């Protein structure tokens, strides 16, 4: 599987519930592409930080979406039973754990036979610690926030000009005085203040909206 560098679409993201409803139709290629573009980085980064190599993490992404595609036709999302964020975390964790189980099982088959006195009553697959399970909560939360911010930026990008977005990034991300930003970009100081305020306000609103939809 070749993971794309950038999303195929910058269109506004629908609510998670409406998107999940669309995914029940596996032929809805636009819906599946949007879902993939929004969440593959999250799954990939969590897999990588759970100890997997690049190719292994890509396999986890692929296996996660294959798993989802097989189950979505009969899926009914009920927020009363848990958040979308928790649901996707459980699915991702299960695919990472499945990788570690397969990896350990393959290695265990190469081990020498037990010598006299060793305990053969414990299943070695159950005995081995699962690094994905140990650290996943913290990793997932951190990567979820990063992914949520990226999604919010994509929403905002569809609502403002490229110049306003550039002004906001420079005024917020780089340690420059606003007057320096104005000079570098050849705009007035008033334009810098306006862009920083407008984009910042929109970004905050989109983050809050995404949190309501997924948390």
Image (cartoon, rainbow, N blue to C red):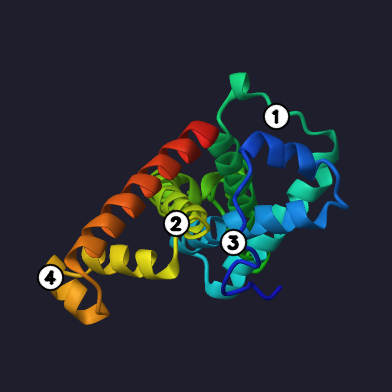
For marks 3 and 2, the one nearer the N-term is 3
Figure check: 12 above or below 47: above
- C-alpha separation, residue under disc 4 versus residue under disc 2: 24 Å
What secondary structure is marked by label 1?
A: loop
- C-alpha separation, residue under disc 1 versus residue under disc 2: 26 Å
Alpha-carbon neighbours of circle 3 within 10 Å: few (<14), some, or many (≥20)?
A: some
Figure check: 14 above or below 32: above
Q: Give the foreground label among 1 and 4.
A: 4
Provide the residue designation for mark 3.
10
Question: How many numbered markers are drawn?
Answer: 4
Alpha-carbon neighbours of circle 4 within 10 Å: few (<14), some, or many (≥20)?
A: some
Q: Give the foreground label among 1 and 2.
A: 2
| Identity of the residue drawn at 26% across and 69% down | 170
Figure check: 104 above or below 91: below
Q: Could you tell me if the residues under marks 3 and 2 are in contact, i.e. CB atoms within 8 Å?
A: no
Q: Give the foreground label among 4 and 2.
A: 4
Is residue 148 at least partly visible in the picture?
yes
For marks 1 and 3, the one nearer the N-term is 3
Provide the residue designation for mark 1.
77
Q: Could you tell me if the residues under marks 1 and 2 are in contact, i.e. CB atoms within 8 Å?
A: no
Alpha-carbon neighbours of circle 1 within 10 Å: few (<14), some, or many (≥20)?
A: some
Q: Could you tell me if the residues under marks 4 and 3 are in contact, i.e. CB atoms within 8 Å?
A: no
For marks 1 and 2, the one nearer the N-term is 1
What secondary structure is marked by label 2?
A: helix
Percent across and percent down for residue 49 are 44, 61
For marks 4 and 3, the one nearer the N-term is 3
Provide the residue designation for mark 4.
179
Question: Splitting the image into 4 quarters, where does residue 24 fall?
Answer: top right
Query: Relative to residue 170, is residue 48 drawn left or right?
Result: right
Percent across and percent down for residue 66 are 77, 55
Provide the residue designation for mark 2.
153
């Amino acid at each position: 599987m070749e993971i794309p560098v950038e999303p195929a679409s910058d269109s506004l993201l629908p609510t998670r519930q409406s998107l999940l409803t669309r995914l029940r139709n596996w032929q809805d290629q636009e819906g599946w592409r949007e879902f993939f573009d929004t969440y593959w980085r999250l799954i990939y980064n969590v897999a990588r930080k759970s100890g997997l190599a690049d190719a292994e993490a890509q396999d986890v992404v692929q296996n996660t979406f294959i798993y989802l595609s097989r189950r979505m036709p009969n899926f009914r999302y009920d927020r009363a039973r848990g958040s979308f964020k928790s649901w996707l975390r459980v699915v991702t964790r299960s695919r990472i754990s499945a990788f570690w189980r397969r990896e350990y099982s393959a290695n265990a088959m190469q081990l020498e036979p037990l010598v006299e006195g060793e305990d053969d009553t414990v299943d070695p697959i159950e005995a081995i610690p699962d690094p994905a399970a140990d650290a996943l909560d913290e990793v997932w939360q951190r990567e979820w926030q990063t992914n949520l911010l990226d999604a919010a930026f994509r929403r905002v990008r569809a609502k403002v000009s490229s110049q306003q977005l550039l002004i906001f990034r420079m005024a917020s991300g780089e340690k420059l005085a606003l007057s320096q930003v104005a000079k570098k970009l050849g705009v007035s100081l008033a334009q810098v203040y306006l862009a920083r305020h407008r984009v910042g306000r929109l970004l905050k609103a989109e983050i809050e909206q995404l949190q309501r939809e997924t948390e």
